[in-house]
Amino acid sequence: MVFHVMLIPTLGCPSNCSYCWSSEENSPVMSIETIKEVVAWLKDFRDDQVTFTFHGGEPLLAGADFYREALPLLADGASHLQPAFALQTNLWKMTPELAQILAEYDIPIGSSLDGPKELNDRQRGIGYYDKTMQGYKIARENGLDVRFICTFTAQSVKFKEDIFNFFLENGLTLKLHPALPSLRAESSDDWVLDSKEYGELLIFLLDKYLENMDDIEVMNIDHLCKCVFTRRGTVCTYVDCMDSTFAVGPDGSIYPCYRFVGMPEYVMGSVYDHPTMEDLAKSDAWARMHKFKDYVDQECKECPHISYCRGGCPYNAMVPSNGEIEGVDPHCTAYKMIFEEITNRINQNFMGAPGMAMNPFQSEPAKDTKPGIMPLIFRTMSK
Ligand code: SF4
Ligand code: SF4
């Protein structure tokens, strides 16, 4: 089992995206002392392989000196956990110096871009596109692998064709996010993507992806196909993340996930106290996350997708009820739509339904039918 420690060096961010809930002005920046305490905490915490993801806010605000010291401390100090790294950034603060430090550790970069310049800047702010593309250029010149998260909002979903074509034509890997409501602010709700629209968007992207499989990678669709085919979740939304994900805030506080960072009621402990799993289990946040797991076991028990959905994201589920567990992830409708679409297409491919390919490896569609899904499934399985 892999476990995931998200490190949030700061909640500060130089950008001001309209629908964002995860930045905070005047947020402190994590000290190297805190990184040393992360290493000490993990010494006897658990034995599974760990992935450290730097997230924010904007993690590059911590600066080159922070990464120059933090990365060897984590790589060597947690070597018994065979650490892997990742970083999620808007790239504005990327410099050749920073890129070289990150490249030494082969750190895959996730960035954010919502489509062509005009569309992107409409929801992320004027100038965002140019600053991100400038950072992208520096990252690529220094050998970093960059993939983009594209947030679809209630506004931008109307331009889904243009957005897909933008990523396709520019040879950029795409992962999509629906704009989500937050426990921390009410102001973003105008942007929030309705669940049915999100489901339709996923099916649209599945079709576009199958038509252009050799020229683009759509990470969500890969994950969803793998989930359905193996009947196991492969990303945090579709597993019991409470057993495998933790986040450390700028001051060393431990939370269930980066989305709770900065909310005192979700603090489970501090890296400075080197808590065990049993210690973290005594916190209210732990109890609430596990209450969600029990709730899903009951509420979703008749759902054919439960083994690879697990009720979706507990944070999303808590937002409409102000932190209480009163429902599953509100995107249940979208998840069911795409899970059923993928399941039906797999069945059609295998059963050779009229108009569909008899041979699961066959990628050429019969006339007037959609391309078969099995070549994509086999590709995702081989990754
Ligand atoms: S709370 Fe949601 S975003 Fe956070 S780790 Fe769990 S599933 Fe992922
Ligand atoms: S699709 Fe909906 S009902 Fe099914 S497991 Fe997921 S959240 Fe539960």
Image: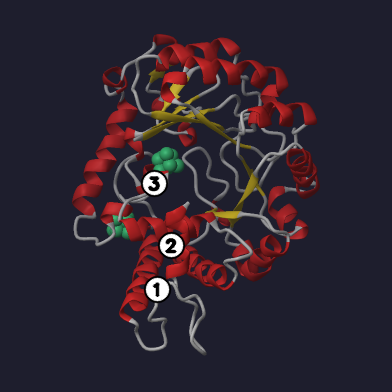
Earlier residue among tags 1 and 3: 3
Residue that numbered label 1 is attached to = 360
Where 371 falls versus 328 (above or below)? below
The numbered disc on residue 378 is: 2
Whether tag 2 and tag 3 are in contact, CB under 8 A, the answer is: no
Place of residue 35 in the rendered image (x, y in percent of width and height, measured from the top left): 54, 15
Report the residue at 49% width, 17% height from top: 252
Amino acid of disc 1: Pro
Amino acid of disc 2: Phe
Viewer-proximal residue among 361 and 101: 361
Q: Is residue 195 visible?
A: no
Where 368 falls versus 73 (above or below)? below
Q: Residues within 10 Å of mark 3 (few under 14, many from 20)?
A: many
Earlier residue among tags 2 and 1: 1
Task: Tell me the SS state at disc 2.
Answer: helix
Amino acid of disc 3: Cys
Where 29 falls versus 125 (above or below)? above
Task: Tell me the SS state at disc 3.
Answer: loop
Task: Tell me the SS state at disc 1.
Answer: loop
Place of residue 111 in the rendered image (x, y in percent of width and height, measured from the top left): 64, 44
- Apparent side of residue 132 relative to residue 222 in the rendered image (left or right): right
Place of residue 283 in the rendered image (x, y in percent of width and height, measured from the top left): 31, 23
Q: Quadrant of the N terminus?
A: top left
Q: Work out how far the residue at label 1 is from the one at label 3, CA to CA, in angstroms.
A: 32 Å
Residue that numbered label 3 is attached to = 313
Whether tag 1 and tag 3 are in contact, CB under 8 A, the answer is: no
Q: Work out how far the residue at label 2 is from the one at label 1, CA to CA, in angstroms.
A: 9 Å
- Apparent side of residue 295 relative to residue 252 in the rendered image (left or right): left
Question: Of discs 1 and 3, which sits in the foreground?
Answer: 1
Q: Ligand 2 shows up in which quadrant of the image?
A: bottom left
Whether tag 2 and tag 1 are in contact, CB under 8 A, the answer is: yes
